[in-house]
Image (cartoon, grey):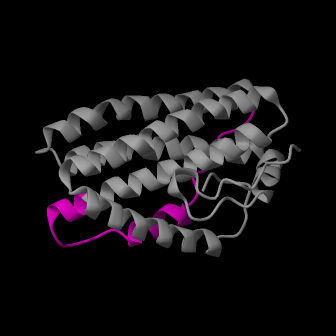
Amino acid sequence: MKKISNDTKTILGLKLPTDPRWVNLAAVSLETILTDHAYCEQKAATTCISVIQKFPHYPNLVATIAPLVTEEWGHFRMVLAEIKKHHLVLGRQRKDFYVNKLMDFCQKGGSELGRLLDQLLLMALIEARSCERFKRLSEGLEDVYWQKFYRLFMESEAGHYTLFIKLAKKYIPKQDVYKRWQEFLNYEAGIMKALMVSGDRIH
């Protein structure tokens, strides 16, 4: 297993890097990682649909997010194709403790713009952490094929992270976006500390 440098603690603003042991564990159970990855892409597509349903009266938001539904679903199909190609099996979807804890941090009441801000930052943070994980897989897996595969996903997630942050700044003052983003990052670091190092899931 290739050694990964641990100097990426500030990737995309993340406060805490992934434990380097995670890649080693993921390499041992690639089938389960691919299964979890597939469901992550599926949930990303349905989340985009949900945002459109919640905020249909923001035309630019709808126009920007709508293409992501197709893109994320395409990613889901790409991972399914890899599972089939390598004679693996798509397992059952597991409860995502990481995402559920992040959702607990989102506003349930308050102003609509406040709820929109939290929704966009939630999506941005999930993409940022996924990007960091895919970066580690692209650098740490021995097989060049899988390195290239996860490099593509790393680049895609980085673009999505940037997109969601830009969308937030379109509707909410930049200083408010920054303040709330820092709160999300600090909260997410606490989640990462509490999580066991497990190689059977992306988050």
Which image quarter: residue 114?
Answer: bottom left
Q: Is residue 137 visible?
A: yes
Q: Which residue range is magenta in the image?
A: 87-116
Q: Is residue 101 magenta?
A: yes
**Measured from the top left, where is residue 43 in percent x and y?**
45, 47
Q: Residue furthest right?
A: 1
Q: Is residue 64 above or below residue 107?
A: above
The residue closer to the viewer here, 147 or 8, is 8
Q: Quadrant of residue 45?
A: top left
Is residue 115 toward the left or the right of residue 85 in the image?
A: left
Residue 86 visible, this orientation: no
Question: x, y percentage for residue 29?
Answer: 79, 48
Quarter of the rendering occupied by the C terminus: bottom right
Residue 129, percent across and down? Answer: 55, 53
Lateral position of residue 116 relative to residue 4, left or right: left
Q: Residue at x 14, y 38 (%)?
A: 59
User: In the displayed structure, does residue 72 sit left or right of residue 180?
Assistant: right
Compared with residue 50, is residue 156 higher up or lower down, i.e. above or below? above
